[in-house]
Image: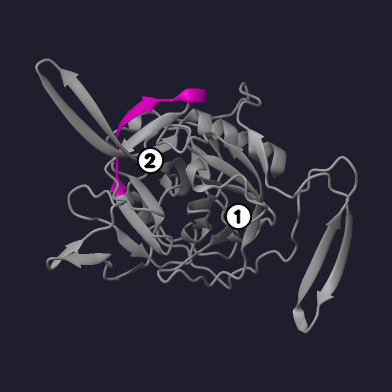
Amino acid sequence: MTHTNEAPDSLKRLLCRGQLDAGQLPQPSTTSELIISSKEKPSFQIDAVKDQADLWKIKIGGLESQLAARQLKIERLLDYKHPGFTSSFKPNGVATSYLPKLARVLKPTLFRLSGRAVAPLSEHIFGADDRAVLKDYSYPWWCIGSVGTGTGTLIGPRLIITAAHCIDFSSRYSTIFTPGKNNLGTTNILSSARVDAWLTGSEDGNVCANDFAIGVLSEPLGISHGWLGTRSFIEDWVDIPHFTHVGLRGGVLPSWQSGLSVEDVDDGPFNTMELETFCDTESGQSGGPLFAYWNGKPYIVGVLSGYEEEFTYSFPLSFSTSHNVFAGGAGMVERVAQMRGEYD
């Protein structure tokens, strides 16, 4: 497949393809890996936990420092070549649903003030709230899940992508990715995986074009779940309403919004882009993908970074515009391609 500038598929075109039925869902991998940074070969000791038949204690010796997830640097291989996209993958026997199953859930509010409902402070809604609650375990929806304080998506056998500001990079192997969460924050997927290393685009916590992080999982969950591809956004796709966003509202409610368009783009460092949208968001959706379909296959063009308000002054008037911004662009795809080459 070669990269072209063709527009993403419309929902009407996708539904004409029909839904792809599935047989029995594949079982996740039962093999885990642990990446350890040490000049000498570490020693391991495995002991049963007393009176706990299903728990095991693993002691690791010979390390010069405490365990911590490795943080790789985006400055590496800035001249890495890529074709403008990375591939998606759907395992055999897994259903594909272009229009997912949605659940009707009354939206909770934090409290009432003088009888009037008050919305969460972190919520940014444009016009009517067009989000619905996702409840679907078919592909690609079950590739999206929770990680850190936000939302992550499988983009390779062992890779996920999220927003950099969602991750505590100093944590000692405590960051877990759990795919396929439903509207109660639980999951019917039997597996989660630890994140052992990160390639980061930004660490300042600001809304920006390079606010993404690519994580290396301890288990290849993508083999059983599949993954989404990534694609470089081009300005020809501005105002085309064929994009979809999924993110975990409050960390528990998978929010789905379709028919989105990118209203404008701003260039960022490392060949990245800020993709400005009127997507409705709140806390927990950060890191969630903005994606569309090309030839029936899903490709991520950006991950949610956050809300941005821009002020413009033109004598004698001044005005402001606001958007929710996704971090994307060719720089994001380059980094994903780089990591796919190293960790596939």
Q: Residue at x 63, y 25 (%)?
A: 80
Q: Which residue is mark 2?
A: 8
Here the colouring is one colour
Q: Amino acid at mark 1?
A: Thr
Q: Is residue 152 above or below residue 254?
A: above
Which quadrant of the figure has residue 256?
Answer: bottom left
Residue drawn at x 42%, y 48% is 286
Provide the residue designation for mark 1: 175
The picture places residue 41, in percent across and down from the top left corner, at: 90, 47
- Helix, strand or loop at disc 2? loop
Q: Are there few (<14), some (14-19), or many (20+) residues within 10 Å of tag 2?
A: many
Q: Position of residue 337 (x, y in %)?
A: 61, 35
- Where residue 216 is drawn, which disc sits there? none
Residue 272 higher or lower than 144, as above or below: above
- Left/right placement of residue 32 relative to residue 195 reads right
Helix, strand or loop for disc 1: loop
Front residue of this view, candidates 37 and 32: 37
> Can residue 282 be spotted in the picture?
yes
Quadrant holding the N terminus = top right
**Nearest the camera: 92 or 67?**
67
Image side of residue 223 versus residue 144, left or right: right
The quarter of the rendered structure image containing the C terminus is top right
Q: Kindly report the secondary structure that dominates the magenta region of the rendered protein.
A: strand
Q: Which residues are magenta?
A: 259-271
Counting residues from the start of the chain, the first of labels 1 and 2 encountered is 2
Q: Is residue 312 magenta?
A: no
